[in-house]
Amino acid sequence: MAGDKLQVLNALDVAKTQWYHFTAIVVAGMGFFTDAYDIFSISLVTKLLGRLYYTNPGSSRPGTLPPNVSAAVNAVALCGTFAGQLFFGWLGDKMGRKRVYGLTLMLMVIGSLASGLSFGHEAKGVMATLCFFRFWLGFGIGGDYPLSATIMSEYANKKTRGAFIAAVFAMQGFGNLTAGIFAIIVSAAFKARYPAPAYEDNAAASLVPEADYVWRIIMMFGSLPAILTYYWRMKMPETARYTALVAKNAKQAATDMAKVLQVDLVDEQEKVDEITSKSSNDFGLFSKQFLKRHGLHLLGTTTTWFCLDAAFYSQSLFQKDVFSAVGWLPAAKTMSALEEVFKVARAQTLISLCGSVPGYWFTVAFIDTMGRFAIQLMGFFMMTAFMFALAIPYNHWTHHDNRIGFIIMYGLTFFFANFGPNATTFVVPAEIFPARLRSTCHGISAATGKVGSIVGTLGFMYLAQSKNHSEVDPGYSTGIGIRDSLMILGGVCALGFFFTFLVPESKGKSLEELSGENEEEEEEETGQSDYSRQGVQRYASRPKTFPVQFNVNLSADV
């Protein structure tokens, strides 16, 4: 049926870039703003939490979170995200994208606010309630992954679809950046109002009681943009692809998209019935037909996302420890509690501003010219190269005069993560699977990535401890050190490079072409679309170097 496509879907594919595209990016993107803010803001306040609740009187060093508490605080939101990605990914295909879209946002808002209101002043009570609320915060964040990606892919035209989906994901960069900037503002304000000496000068006075408000205010602020976009999220119509191809309601699909596109569209119920009635278009996730058509694709999207998140989250959540190890941050005992929050936030903001945020928007600019495959391959390669460049001569980077070079190299790993697999692993699963399984498969891919983030986060937390027992944080055993940990992360990125060859290129094709829903009957009877059959053979014939074009004109269709 390649030449007999539904008019409503064809209208979406060829639509010029319009205001509703940008509205959808902002409405969907605010969920990812809150996601990044809440996930990564915890790394800004963990040192403060350690001082507040785990400082031992008379100790020569400020308190730090015990290993089990640190593991729980850092990983519990990721565990919630894993569960939310699977649950809401499945629910988005069963009930529709729109019907559950508002619920994920409200879970994020409530979880974010409640995290800052964690009960009590005793360590056990505060940490237990913080972990409880952060799990449900993560659950809502997890749901936003498959739903936002699927909604944006099904709304976008095929020419600039990659840029639109990537722009939704790029709001993570602003969330991360805002977390750092807001932490700087709050800590600076409290530091000016409640000055305190360094811990080594006066341990008791270095931690003012008002510091307990600082981490709570930082945690709660991320909910505000999400609250402001809730109304607009609920006003978005269901996507035409779900309404027509899954709910099988051609009239409603045409009506909804006629309002969005401001064109007249014909109700094609007979054609919808013809497409959806074919046995080759109703196979399930656990069928042999899905395995033949999309098995390698799902393997590719899950493994690459796992490798990316294992490296990316361990780097992001433990930047402060890396910075301390190379001497960019002063020793904790030479600072007051609020000064430490300020300097940690300043360091992470600089990395985000110079590395992470530009990387996201480079992807937005080039994804529909270079293609997803080339960007992902390049990103993994550069991440691997920079990880090894940091790890192999690690002792060189720890010298005082070389610290700036280390920070630049470290920032470049974030740049190529975001101008690379951190964006493309989000984009591709929203494009290559059938409409009735699209949200589910995206959720599975993202959840596998979160397994990688949990493994990377917990592994790095323990492995990165110094080999020298006297330099190990209280409660930890000796580890393999930052150098060897970076070597392992480099190896993980190298695996991601090779698994990328399982992921198909989706640039410039309609979603129905990519998923095989628009293939001729004869092709469907074989269990594979032409697109899927080419699979690995197509990548085997790729040239060893890929062409990169920089002639981007995103305003061409505006």
Image (spheres, helix red, strand yellow):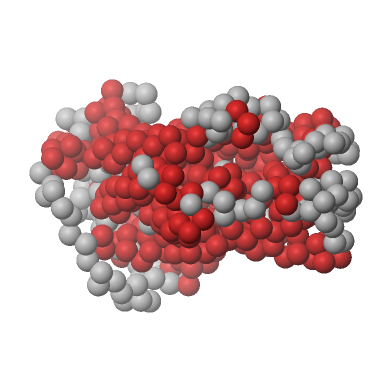
Q: Position of residue 268 (x, y in %)?
A: 35, 53
- The residue at 77%/51% (across/down) is 337
Between 322 and 553, which is closer to the camera in this rendering? Answer: 322
Q: How many marks?
A: 0
Q: Nearer the viewer, residue 412 or 396?
A: 396
Residue 421 placement (x, y as % from top left): 37, 48
The reply, left or right, for residue 34 in relation to residue 525 is: right
Compared across the picture, whether 461 is left or right of 186 comes to left
- Measured as percent of width and height from the top left, residue 198 is found at 79, 53
Give the residue at x 44% y 64%. 358
**Residue 37 visible, this orientation:** no
The part of the image, by quadrant, that contains residue 365 is bottom left
Say which quadrant the C terminus sits in: bottom left
In the depicted structure, whether residue 361 falls above or below residue 445? below
Q: Give the quadrant of residue 30.
A: bottom right
Residue 296 x/y as whole percent: 27, 32
Residue at horizontal 63%, vertical 37%? 74
